[in-house]
């Protein structure tokens, strides 16, 4: 659980640093990009607004000036060969006007019968030209100045304007008509020049009919654009839009946003329309947004990678520290030092940690020494107490130490742990501590005890339990000590416990106690041999002794792990404990 918490904390630091780098790296970039895009868009729209309004106004003025100039020239035209007027004689019109201006394609002098000389630079193939000329003639003959067109002559690939003026005599009567065909190609070129970069500039009349357009195909189509949002706005307002507006048109079922403006042409019921698809107009902004997004993503990835790198740079030493601390905690490996080779606070922390482990190691060593000394002192006290007990009876001198040795041999055969062996050692040394409370005359009696004396002797396990109960640290050995005279069949004392109900330490000490009693000289018997004592003990397995304990002891004897402390000789006599 502790390891999990450490790992979770490290992940959190790495994630936090990565997020921090991401925020610090990307947010300012996004804000600056957003501001740049916003400024760029505003400047572009402002520039577009000024450009469109200026262009529409300029184109409008140029068209008006162009046509006005030719109308004036026609009005002021004074044919040199006036004698031809009114005659039916056909012939060239010798006029400098025609010769010097390349945009005048044809000039005619017509009498009231519609006949007269003409000169032309272009032999028109378009069959509609005579019809347009006749209409112009009729209007001028009525005494009205006439402007017709623009007309796109497909076969001749030229856009023309027809201008007709009445020629009056001194009585102000119309006697003839001057009819001129003017090329509008210079105006088409102006529209074409202004239509670069997706911008469209064209001219419509008061009904929305397309008059002039840079593309010949559009001119040839004779389209009415009144349905267009921007042309409709021009027709409704009369061409007074002094800014750029956003128009929405539906083309092929898809809505399209258009930025545009328009301007009326002075002296004519025409209007110049200028427009551009918003997506094309703001293409640079859109491109900037795409570039910004692309670089933003790349920068975000770079920031995230930098965050991960720096997070690792910071958390890896911490992980080393944590791992080392865990190693020290689990294995008390105080000799291992942290080697970071850094020059920052983490290295300072590592040095402090190394110093701390040295101090802990020293303190633990001191504590261990103190504990060892305490234990030695304790065990010495136990042995001293055991020696005091044994000393009460000269025949049992060294008895407690030997019982302890035999008991430990059996316990090792049974696989006791170190703590269990330690507990058994104390229990065995003190098993007869209750004899302190038994009168010496009974303890040292060289002959068999009377029944009354034996009853007194039988109280020593309980007396021992009472003595040891004063020491809290020995509470867990009391049951074993108290049971060292219990028999496996329940015939023992002081409680008459039976079988597994007898504490194991008690069952074990019983065998060791008996073996020592049998193999040492007593007032009532001489010491038996190891083999004799072992056979006697085996014969009582399951009756007086625990068979498992007897078996373990037998194996220990067979393996040579049990040796007597002094030579003994066999004496096949009954034994009394
Ligand atoms: Fe005893």
Image (cartoon, rainbow, N blue to C red):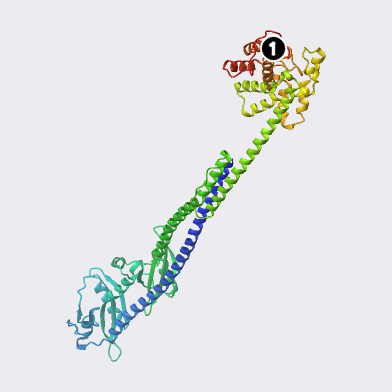
Seen in the picture, residue 535 relative to 314 is either above or below; the reply is: above
From the image, which quarter does the N terminus lie in?
top right
Q: Position of residue 380 (x, y in %)?
A: 69, 30
Residue at far bottom of view: 170
Q: Position of residue 532 (x, y in %)?
A: 64, 10
Disc 1 target residue? 526
The residue lying at 71 percent from left, 21 percent from top is 397
**Snapshot quadrant of residue 271:** bottom left
Front residue of this view, candidates 334 and 278? 334
Relative side of 6 to 116, left or right: right
Near mark 1 (Cα within 10 A), the count class, few <14, some 14-19 or many ≥20, is: some
**Snapshot quadrant of residue 110:** bottom left
Relative side of 165 to 208, left or right: left
- Mark yes or no: residue 7 visible: no
Front residue of this view, candidates 248 and 533? 533
From the image, which quarter does the C terminus lie in?
top right
**Snapshot quadrant of residue 73:** bottom left
Quarter of the displayed picture in which ligand 1 can be seen: top right
Q: Position of residue 222 (x, y in %)?
A: 32, 67
Seen in the picture, residue 434 relative to 292 is either above or below; the reply is: above
Q: Position of residue 77 (x, y in %)?
A: 26, 86
């Amino acid at each position: 659980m502790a390891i999990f918490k450490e790992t979770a904390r490290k992940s959190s630091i790495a994630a936090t640093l990565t997020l921090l780098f991401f925020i610090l790296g990307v947010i300012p970039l996004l804000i600056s990009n957003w501001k740049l895009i916003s400024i760029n868009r505003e400047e572009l729209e402002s520039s577009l607004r000024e450009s469109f309004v200026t262009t529409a106004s300029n184109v409008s003025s140029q068209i008006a000036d162009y046509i006005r100039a030719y109308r004036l020239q026609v009005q002021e035209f004074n044919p040199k060969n006036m004698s031809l007027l009114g005659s039916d004689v056909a012939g060239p019109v010798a006029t400098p006007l025609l010769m010097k201006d390349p945009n005048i394609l044809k000039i005619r002098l017509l009498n009231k019968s519609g006949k007269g000389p003409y000169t032309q630079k272009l032999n028109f193939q378009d069959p509609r030209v005579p019809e347009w000329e006749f209409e112009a003639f009729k209007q001028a003959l009525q005494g009205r100045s006439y402007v017709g067109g623009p007309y796109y002559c497909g076969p001749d690939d030229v856009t023309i304007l027809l201008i007709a003026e009445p020629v009056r005599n001194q009585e102000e009567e119309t006697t003839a008509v001057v009819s001129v065909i003017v090329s509008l190609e210079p105006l088409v070129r102006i529209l074409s020049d202004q239509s670069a970069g997706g911008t469209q500039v064209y001219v419509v009349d008061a009904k929305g009919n397309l008059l002039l357009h840079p593309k010949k195909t559009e001119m040839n189509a004779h389209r009415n654009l009144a349905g267009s949002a921007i042309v409709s706005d021009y027709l409704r307002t009369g061409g007074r839009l002094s800014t750029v507006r956003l128009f929405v048109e539906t083309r092929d079922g898809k809505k399209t946003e258009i930025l545009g403006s328009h301007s009326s042409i002075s002296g004519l019921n025409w209007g110049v329309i200028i427009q551009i698809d918003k997506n094309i107009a703001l293409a640079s902004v859109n491109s900037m947004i795409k570039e910004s997004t692309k670089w933003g993503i790349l920068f975000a990835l770079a920031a995230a990678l930098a965050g991960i790198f720096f997070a690792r740079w910071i958390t890896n030493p911490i992980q080393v520290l944590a791992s080392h601390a865990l190693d020290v905690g689990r294995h008390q490996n105080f000799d291992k030092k942290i080697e970071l080779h850094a020059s920052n606070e983490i290295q300072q922390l590592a040095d402090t940690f190394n110093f701390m482990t040295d101090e802990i190691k020293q303190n633990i060593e001191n504590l261990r020494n103190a504990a060892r000394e305490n234990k030695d002192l304790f065990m010495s006290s136990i042995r001293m107490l055991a020696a005091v007990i044994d000393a009460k009876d000269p025949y049992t001198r060294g008895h407690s130490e030997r019982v302890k040795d035999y008991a430990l041999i059996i316990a090792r055969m049974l696989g006791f742990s170190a703590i269990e062996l330690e507990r058994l050692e104390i229990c065995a040394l003190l098993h007869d501590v209750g004899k302190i409370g038994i009168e010496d005359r009974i303890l040292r009696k060289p002959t068999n005890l009377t029944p009354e004396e034996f009853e007194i002797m039988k109280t020593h396990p309980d007396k021992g339990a009472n003595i040891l109960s004063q020491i809290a640290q020995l509470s867990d050995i009391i049951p074993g000590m108290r049971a060292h005279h219990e028999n496996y069949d329940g015939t023992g004392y002081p409680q008459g416990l039976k079988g597994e109900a007898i504490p194991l330490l008690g069952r074990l000490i019983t065998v060791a106690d008996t073996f020592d009693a049998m193999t040492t000289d007593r007032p009532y018997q001489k010491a038996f041999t190891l083999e004799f004592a072992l056979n006697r003990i085996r014969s009582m397995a399951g009756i007086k002794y625990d068979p498992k304990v007897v078996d373990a002891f037998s194996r220990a004897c067979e393996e040579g792990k049990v040796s007597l402390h002094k030579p003994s000789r066999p004496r096949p006599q009954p034994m009394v404990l």
